[in-house]
Image: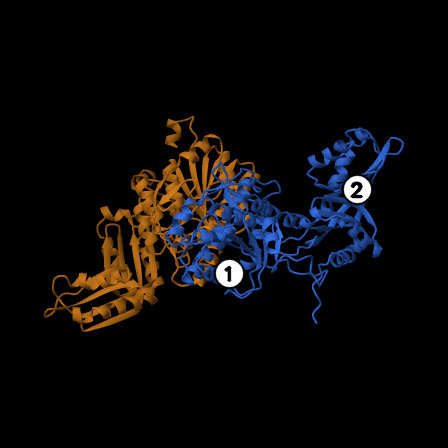
Chain colours: A orange, B blue
């Protein structure tokens, strides 16, 4: 808005990204196109970023995997990236049908340049000059998400969910005032509404908070896209693609810089949301010799085996030995144990103990920085409900606890209420 | 063969093209890949050209058409060309699984440059240098047929069946010794074996003959691909993709220059094949004033309406008026009549008469050039069976007659026998 005030003659740019369920068939593409037409009507220059039709990427991935398990990632990319080309063309055609001048771009045509890590590439740069020339001719852009072109001149993909990242990168490249991510949820909530019916929509949330929530299981935005938005200060809006196409939807959630939150919220909650993840497992290494470098010696092989270690706790040493406890994703347990077995003699631990019945519950909020006592309130709320805390980790804006999995919902509800997040009850 | 003798150290190059039914699923792709592996084993550098999986192009075309009837051909191309990208990647992966080093190329990566007639582009040039560098590294090529890149930098397609043309163009660009077109028929026959069980496989056929047969309804090769092969002297072999993958198939049909036929055939038949087309209609314009320019005045509006006129006959003039008879494709009759109505007053003809129950039967052969009496033998053979001839046209290597449609099979069989094409009966 302030930008418009400064340059009243320049059109404001907008990125609108539609995920797979939002372009699952021609009817939904039309619905999405109407939303684009409405923003064009409001005077925006729009770059639309689209995913493949729902199910299409899985179909293509299955074809590639059926050929053989050890596939050439460059060929995987060549095959799998085709799904977005189809939706980009169909979206451009649908916009034209609605009277909106538009053309599709393929990743290499823009070009969207990426690293050469085929199958999991990262965007290195986007040259938006060609798109901007077409904007000047009144031509809106439709861009396939998830893809780019690698330094070897071959098509690359960004890894699953990469279309969010494409959208944010395009927004940064064209200087869009906002990147709207249309998805099948209508906003970011203070917690999972299936667990806590009193969960509230979050109107505005800081990049840092969204990052913590995204990585903690609130799977609304891909983590990388939030990192990118934060780095380039791209305001992201999450909203539903299934509402009224002419734009009178309930507003979604704005993800933006912290200072814009403070400006917009007179009274800020200390905690913005409660997240949880049930896909956790706890591994304890019993009686490791307590000497410098032992933690690294343990964690090193796990990293080498591709296991992501999350929480780590080391017990107080007892007669020169200690216990190390850490959590990994449930799917990584077997690989983690195998990796630890290979260094058994080297480390000289007594035994490995695994608990697959755990869950992680976290409270997140930039307000924590300036409010003491959040941890104490959290532990008290859980104690009151008889929830035992197994492991604790904290960061500047997040406190996570590991609990017995059966207490997940109870813990989330207790914390949601304790931090004043419950929606007011209707009279 | 002679090229190999001249450059004994250089590997010979081969193009192998597989149509939609030959890559319809992963099993068939594997079968095709085994044929490629066999040719690689024999020491060839191979460029594989693939169509989209059977049904895929139709699915994509339907999606585009469902958006709206008047679609942007550039977006049509962006969408429809994606099918070949999928098979190209899958073929490269399958070859790698079989131990054949290969990579896929997208049309713009080669690049295959075309005109800007999106949806029906023509190949203008192929820069094979990048592919040839990869050949030198031992890497065989997989190239999507049917697509290229237009001068505007956008993806183009060549029109339906364009993959044959892609294959021949690639063969010319890389100097391949042969372009093998694997398809769902195993050879070109002297006539349709469904009509004449005694039809024989043709071992060798001249480009000119194949062109006449292709345009007359023997739908084995796209006409444009034959024209291109003739212009660049690319030897084309038509063969079945469903035989033994290790290459002991029955040989297919070689399409090549006339002089190579004579070299290879001691005794040449005057007629090489009998073709027919049932999709014909005859239109007669009654009592047109017989003055100079009337034929052009009639045919002009038809061309402008996109109607392809085939045979044309003008009767002997009678008291200053004449009848003009011509044939058009059955699907074009209504458009042809509408076009003629628009010039009714201008031309001053008496009436239009349409006969949709006709068929065209043709004999084709380069031997006709040096043998007199072919027409006479043809007419005699038809007369003997009581088949009345309505219209006759001749070219240097072809004689076509229009007959009542119910006589199609009878006429084809009679001519096949009369010109000595029937296979010898088994003892």
Residue at 35% across, 50% down: A121
Q: Is residue B296 left or right of residue A198?
A: right
Q: Which mark is residue B32?
A: 1
Q: Quadrant of the N terminus of chain A?
A: top left
Element carrying mark 1 = helix
Q: Is residue A284 left or right of residue B383?
A: left
Residue at 50% across, 39% down: B150
Element carrying mark 2 = strand
Whether residue A53 is visible to the viewer of this picture, yes or no, is no
Label 2, residues with CA under 10 Å away: few <14, some 14-19, many ≥20: some
Whether residue B171 is visible to the viewer of this picture, yes or no, is yes
List x then y, in percent, for residue B192: 69, 58
List x then y, in percent, for residue A162: 39, 50
Residue A317, above or below B328: below
Q: Which mark is residue B221?
A: none
Q: Which residue is mark 2?
A: B283
């Amino acid at each position: 808005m302030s930008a418009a005030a400064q340059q009243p003659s320049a059109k404001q740019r907008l990125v609108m990204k539609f995920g797979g369920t939002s372009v699952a068939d021609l009817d939904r593409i039309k619905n999405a196109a109407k939303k684009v037409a409405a923003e064009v009507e409001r005077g925006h220059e729009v770059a639309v970023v689209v995913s493949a039709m729902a199910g299409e990427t899985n179909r293509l991935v299955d074809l590639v995997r059926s050929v053989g398990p050890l596939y050439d990632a460059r060929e995987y990319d060549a095959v799998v990236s085709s799904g977005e080309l189809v939706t980009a063309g169909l979206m451009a055609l649908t916009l034209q049908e609605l009277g909106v001048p538009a053309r599709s771009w393929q990743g290499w045509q823009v070009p969207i340049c990426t690293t050469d890590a085929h199958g999991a590439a990262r965007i290195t740069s986007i040259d938006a000059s060609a798109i901007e020339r077409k904007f000047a001719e009144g031509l809106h852009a439709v861009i396939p998400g998830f893809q780019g072109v690698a330094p070897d001149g071959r098509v690359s993909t960004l890894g699953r969910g990469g279309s969010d990242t494409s959208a944010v990168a395009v927004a940064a490249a064209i200087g869009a005032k906002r990147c709207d991510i249309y998805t099948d949820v209508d906003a970011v909530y203070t917690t999972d509404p299936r667990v806590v019916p009193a969960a509230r929509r979050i109107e505005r949330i800081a990049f840092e908070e969204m990052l913590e929530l995204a990585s903690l299981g609130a799977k609304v935005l891909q983590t990388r896209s939030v990192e990118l938005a934060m780095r380039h200060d791209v305001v992201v809006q999450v909203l539903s693609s299934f509402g009224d196409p002419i734009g009178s939807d309930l507003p979604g959630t704005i993800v933006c810089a912290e200072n814009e939150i403070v400006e917009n919220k007179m009274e800020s909650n200390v905690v913005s949301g409660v997240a949880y993840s049930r896909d956790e497992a706890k591994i304890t290494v019993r009686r490791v010799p307590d000497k410098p470098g032992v933690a690294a010696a343990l964690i090193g092989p796990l990293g080498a085996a591709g296991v992501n270690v999350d929480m780590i706790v080391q017990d107080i040493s007892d007669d020169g030995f200690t216990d190390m406890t850490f959590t990994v994703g449930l799917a990584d347990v077997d690989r983690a144990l195998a990796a630890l077995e290979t260094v058994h003699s080297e480390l000289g631990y007594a035994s490995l103990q695994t608990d697959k019945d755990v869950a992680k519950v976290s409270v997140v909020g930039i307000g924590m920085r300036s409010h003491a006592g959040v941890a104490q309130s959290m532990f008290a709320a859980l104690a009151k409900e008889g929830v035992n805390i197994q492991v604790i980790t904290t960061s500047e804006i997040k406190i996570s606890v590991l609990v017995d999995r059966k207490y997940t919902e109870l813990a989330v509800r207790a914390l949601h209420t304790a931090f004043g997040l419950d929606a007011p009850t209707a009279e």
